[in-house]
Amino acid sequence: MPSQRVTFENESGTRLAGIIDAAEGTPIAYAVFAHCFTCTKDLKAIVKISRQLAKRSISVLRFDFSGLGSSGGQFEESNFETNLADLRTAVDWLSATHEAPQLLIGHSLGGAAAMASVSEFESVKALATLAAPSCTAHLADFLASQNSDIETTGSGIVTIGGRDHLITTQLLKSLRGFDLETRIRSIRVPHLIMHSPVDATVKYSCAEDLLEWGAGAKSLLGLPGSDHLLLNQREDANWVADCVAVWAGRFFE
């Protein structure tokens, strides 16, 4: 199963890095995968899910948001709006060079980005989110609680997943000011909501919000015992991919 490294520029001229996990032969559909906050396209679960989807004949473009992984830009200059712009760039690039995606996938804050932008993409027939929040303001509050310098001096270092990240007040403002609920209520495409009842990072009640608010067909898939990054149970990522492939396949044209 071939994987291809690709690069493309966002609207600001920043180079974004991606990988296409390609299906063997002619794919039944293409998908774009948006990763979690401060993660990258190379997160173990994202790699496993993308490769398993490729085995199921769905080619997947996974990419790094600006300032993360192999993409250019400075993380401290990024925010939720730049994430949305990067996701649009990825969809547009895939549409121009391969095929317009019919499936959009997002993990955690990447799931929030997918929900916030899915209505813009006419080609997308199905949306799958994994451990996604129903509000971006909670992340801002968490970050602010980790280092008081962020709000008193304008920036501060926060350690996430063992790595230090410079967090600025502009990021907090972006997260606090974004009306995600209204975007969720506008979703019309079928939405597969995947969430662990014991997720300690994003509460399961967020999945219940998504199930209540979305305007289109919705399905809630519980992930018993899973942690936020799908690391504690070895087969979870492949199982998630198989479920997504079976569920989304009925909506592809």
Image: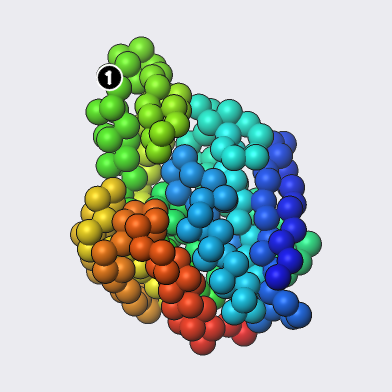
Residue in front for this viewpoint, 214 or 47: 47
226 relative to 42, above or below = below
124 relative to 115, above or below = below
Residue in front for this viewpoint, 78 or 159: 159
Q: Quadrant of the C terminus?
A: bottom right
Asked if one can make out residue 100 in the rendered structure from this viewpoint, the answer is no
Q: What residue type is labelled 1?
A: Ser
Q: Residue at x 66, y 34 (%)?
A: 72
157 relative to 132, above or below = above
Residue in front for this viewpoint, 143 or 238: 238
Q: Which residue is drawn at 41% across and 49% down?
A: 109
Q: State the residue lying farthest toward the right.
A: 97
Q: In this view, does 102 lie to the left or right of 22?
A: left
Q: Residue at x 35, y 20 (%)?
A: 150
Q: Mark 1 points at which residue?
A: 148
User: Percent from the top left, x then y, of residue 206?
Assistant: 26, 58
Q: In this view, does 10 lie to the left or right of 79?
A: right
Q: Is residue 36 left or right of residue 25?
A: left
- Assign a secondary structure to mark 1: loop
How would you rate the neighbour count of disc 1 (Cα within 10 Å): few for under 14, some for 14-19, many for 20 or more?
some
Q: Which residue is drawn at 57% across and 43% down?
A: 65
Asked if one can make out residue 196 in the rendered structure from this viewpoint, the answer is yes
